[in-house]
Amino acid sequence: QVQLVESGGGLVQAGGSLRLSCAASGRTFVGYAMGWFRQAPGKEREFVAAISWSGGNRYYADSVKGRFTISRDNAKNTVYLQMSSLKPEDTAVYYCAANRGVATMTLDEYDYWGQGTQVTVSS
């Protein structure tokens, strides 16, 4: 079992930046790919970014490409999502997730999920 706890959400003006963190604990973190997803009110949860265990492979949704950066520090069992040039449409609850396989954009392939952190971007 892997426990995931997100932090770093909050209220920011459009054009601003935030960095989300996801700390993993419990069972070994070794070998897990990690992903970030988000869910806006009334919408389905959607893929944002994913990173392989080594960090060598990274994937982004088209809507965040060039603005968001996913990274990880395996020594700290932590994954980050640096978000810049934020837009009101980025407002959502952001979730991190762990996958024992490869980094993927597919929600159903993730095994463990955090509780989420709210990001609100004002116009």
Image: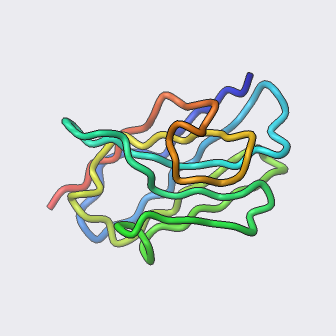
* Residue at 26 percent of width and 42 percent of height: 40
Image side of residue 72 versus residue 90, left or right: right
Residue 27, percent from left and from top: 81, 27
107 over 79 or under it: above or below: above
Residue 110, percent from left and from top: 60, 37
Q: Quadrant of residue 54?
A: bottom right
Image quarter where the N terminus lies is top right
Residue 102, percent from left and from top: 71, 52
16 over 96 or under it: above or below: below
42 over 103 or under it: above or below: above
Image side of residue 77 versus residue 123, left or right: right
* Residue at 45 percent of width and 34 percent of height: 116
Q: Quadrant of residue 67?
A: bottom left
* Residue at 45 percent of width and 56 percent of height: 48
Image side of residue 57 versus residue 19, left or right: right
| Furthest residue in direction left, as rendered | 123
Q: In this orientation, which residue lies closer to the viewer: 9 or 67?
A: 67
58 over 47 or under it: above or below: below
* Residue at 56 percent of width and 65 percent of height: 59
| Furthest residue in direction top, as rendered | 1
Image quarter where the C terminus lies is bottom left
Residue 120, percent from left and from top: 27, 48
